[in-house]
Image (spheres, rainbow, N blue to C red):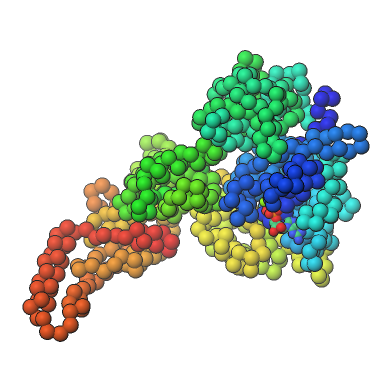
Amino acid sequence: MSNTTNHIRNFCIIAHIDHGKSTLADCFLELTQTVSQRDMKEQILDQMDLEREKGITIKLQPVRMKYKLGDQEYELNLIDTPGHVDFNYEVSRSLAAVEGAILLVDAVQGIQAQTLSNLYLALEQDLTIIPVINKIDLPNADVEGTQQEIMNLLSIKKEDILLVSAKTGQGVEQILKEVIKQVPPPQGEINKPFKALIFDSHFDEYKGVMAYIRVVDGQIKSEDKILMMASQQEAEVLETGIFNPKLKKVTELSVGEIGYLATGLKISQHCRVGDTVVNPKIKVEALPGYKEVKPMVFAGIYLSEGSNFNKLRESLEKLQLNDAALTFEPDYSQALGHGFSCGFLGLLHLEIIQERLKREYNLKVIITTPSVAYHVKLKNGQQLLVHRPQEMPEPTKVESVQEPWMKVDIITPEKYLGPIMELVTNKNGEYISTEYLDHQVKTTYQRRVILHYDLPLNSLIRDFYDKLKSVSSGYASLNYEFNNYRSTEIIKLDILISEEKMPALSALIYKDSSFQEARQIVQSLKNNIPRQMFEIKIQAVINSDDKGGGKIIASERIAPMRKDVTAKLYGGDVTRKRKLLAKQKKGKQKMRQMGRVNIPPEAYLAMFKR
Ligand code: GDP
Ligand code: MG
């Protein structure tokens, strides 16, 4: 190890949502006078409005602070990790950029699912963990109970856990001292060829993709040539800089440091999180752990009335510049018109995109019910990735179908164990094991457990979280990650309206529950399609083929209505009444000839919300 990095400490804060990560980071900024009092806006590290409202951190915002201990001035680089499970991979890459992690636990809430999953990720990276209990100023803080949980989890002594209040500032300076004392300085060689890890990026209109990097070896300055190893993209560095927390140009970035490179690249996918940046002329080995994150959840985004298709496309393109995980392709739906079929990391990711379209681009959109992607193997050996019903081949051609399963951890007070287990079982979950967070049961302290399950992603994206919160009175917390693909029996259900197949209403459903689902769909359509002048027949069909064959498994009828067009006319004028009735009769004939039912988008959406 060289002496050049002895004054550097790179660390992050891992915490469950709302446990005080942003507040603590603000406290650090104030304490180290990184941001002047005048500029000190509450929670300066959470830059997006949306994040602040939802209390989550989506994009990491790193910061460099100076802190003097003894005679030595230290450079402390703090990375704020995203706090949601959809972004687990991003968390793992930012953890790979540092040597230490502050494990921040709310003294009222205790350890929660997200605390645990991030802790495991940090331990995988061999980080030094500094456990901290926050919010000790609150009257209902259970410091002792939380200490017990952490001691049990990390096998450490009570004295090793710091007690702080990020709100009042009590104990916060001690954390920085412990970071300097316990977290090792970054390793690496200044004389080796340049190598750095990309742990995040954002897009700048003038400077292109700004890669956030941790320099592993060597150094880098503007005008140097660089190569992104996974994407094989070359570029020239336009600028190097640090996070202060605003971007601040510096002449070079050196071994162990955290900063940014302006790459001039116009496509975010050329500079992905987890990739290794090197000097293109010198062959070096890529850093471990890179993977291209794949969308797990798919949904259609369609225009609601009055919106503009080109504007939607441009907005999605812009969003993608800051979000390489978002995918989209044009799509057309009979019921909803022009739109895009989009891929997301998870439900929250979807929600964020929807909100950003609304807030930043003033676009109101209709989002179809999310679905997962199935691996379909055909009898001819071909492999397909299917997430839209129309992509599912005829049953006779399909050899097998697989669906994604997740590993799920639920943390809950013991008293909700029964209803939670029942919920997960109903959702086809497979029980793995139970752990107790605290072995020492105290009368004042509610014993809490961790439940480990395997669960189909399909179940997870269908109101699982809401149900979990409701059966546990809000106390259970949930974490999940992709586990594997497993065999499943999925079939396509087609809907005929007055004998005409409506591709927009097709759905992919479990074969096991096909009768039940078909009934619900047909019923929901009946309730949401307005009556017309003629009878409407609604049928649900499985095993349908191109020749109009198939098996009807559910059907409903909507009785015709005789619209009382004369209601508004009172009394006498019989001739006008007659004329109107005659007109109505003609209209009826016309519609029947057309044989088409106008299905409002609401009916389409209601069917999926069943
Ligand atoms: P994050 O989601 O982990 O970033 O959490 P925040 O920093 O946004 O904090 C969540 C809430 O807890 C906010 O309302 C904070 O004001 C509050 N909070 C954070 N730290 C403390 C603390 O030490 N004491 C008290 N009483 N409230 C705190
Ligand atoms: Mg926050």
Return the x and y of residue 326 as percentages of the image width and height: 50, 41
- Nearest the viewer among 137 and 474 is 137
Residue 392 placement, left or right of 60:
left
View quadrant of ligand 1 = bottom right
For the point 15% across and 85% down, the residue is 571
For the point 60% across and 64% down, the residue is 469
Please state, as top left, top right, bottom left or bottom right, where the C terminus lies in the image. bottom left
Q: Looking at the image, is 416 positioned above or below residue 296? A: below
Q: How many marks?
A: 0
Residue 433 placement, left or right of 345:
right
Q: Looking at the image, is 205 positioned above or below residue 164? A: above
Residue 453 shows up from this direction: no
Return the x and y of residue 586 as percentages of the image width and height: 11, 66
Return the x and y of residue 493 as percentages of the image width and height: 35, 55
Please state, as top left, top right, bottom left or bottom right, where the N terminus lies in the image. top right
For the point 44% across and 58% down, the residue is 512
Which image quadrant for residue 425?
A: bottom right
Which image quadrant for residue 573?
A: bottom left
- Nearest the viewer among 338 and 411 is 338
Residue 352 placement, left or right of 336:
right
Q: Residue furthest front?
A: 38
Q: Residue furthest left?
A: 575
- Nearest the viewer among 217 and 169 is 169
For the point 12% across and 72% down, the residue is 580
Which image quadrant for residue 555?
A: bottom left
Q: Residue furthest right?
A: 70
Return the x and y of residue 434 as percentages of the image width and height: 70, 58
Q: Residue furthest top?
A: 281
Q: Looking at the image, is 52 positioned above or below residue 233? A: below
Residue 6 shows up from this direction: yes
